[in-house]
Amino acid sequence: MSVVADVISALLARGLTIAVAESLTGGLLVADLISVPGASAVVRGGVVAYATDLKASLLGVDAALLAASGPIHPDVARQLADGVRTRLAADIGISTTGVAGPDPQDGHAPGEVWLGFAIGGDVSAVGLSLGGDRDAIRRETVSESLSRLRLLLPE
């Protein structure tokens, strides 16, 4: 079974729903989730907040944090995950933010990625340093998001 199918199966078995906030992955993560038959029972939806201002206005990321640190920051990833979980009324929120490249952004190198996870009262962020071209970084971000989510799901 693929990781994405395993995640959907685990969510179904636990009666949990998920919502996704994406920046650098631009919808790839939620597309992967809904590629699995039966996903509609657990996937509430996804928000692609590619522009920095949308992270604040749509998902509640602290505008002062964004102004001070920019969108590539562990606290931004956490707030994105928690914001999408709250706004889409899901049990779990997951987020992706970072630089896919090819050029650096705001002093951050391509491949610097932050994943956010909001599961119950636990909100966390995981940093990644990925290599490859733009497409490889985006695809690896999706893969890592799903793999790490599967490990974090309550038993």
Image: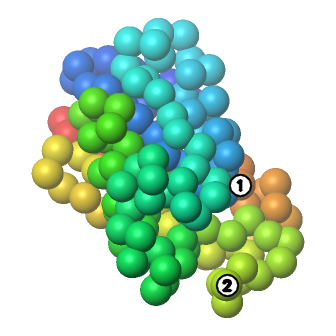
The answer to whether residue 59 is visible is: yes
Which of these two is toward me, 141 or 67?
67
- Where residue 111 sits, quadrant-wise, is bottom right
Residue type for callout 1:
Arg
For the point 44% across and 59% down, which residue is it? 56
Binning the other alpha carbons within 10 Å of mark 1 as few (below 14), some (14 to 19) or many (20 upward) gives many
Quadrant in which the C terminus is drawn: top left
In the rendered image, residue 104, in percent from the top left (x then y), is placed at 76, 81
- Position of 24 relative to 94 (above/below): below
Residue at the farthest left position: 121
Q: Quadrant of residue 153?
A: top left
Q: How is the image coloured?
A: rainbow
Q: Nearer the viewer, mark 1 or mark 2?
A: 2
User: In the drawing, what numbered circle is on residue 106?
Assistant: 2
The local secondary structure at tag 2 comes to loop
Residue at left offset 46%, top offset 86%: 68
Please indicate whether residue 37 sits to the left or right of residue 17 in the image: right
Q: Position of residue 7 (x, y in %)?
A: 42, 31
For image coordinates 71% across by 50% down, the residue present is 139
Q: Who's the residue at 36% across and 55% down the image?
A: 60
Give the SS element for disc 1: helix
Residue 90: which numbered mark, if any?
A: none
Measured from the top left, where is residue 123 in percent x and y?
25, 58
- According to the picture, the residue beneath numbered tag 1 turns out to be 138
Residue 18: image location, x then y, percent? 36, 32
Give the amino acid type for the residue marked by disc 2 in the picture. Answer: Asp
Mark 1–mark 2 contact, CB under 8 Å? no
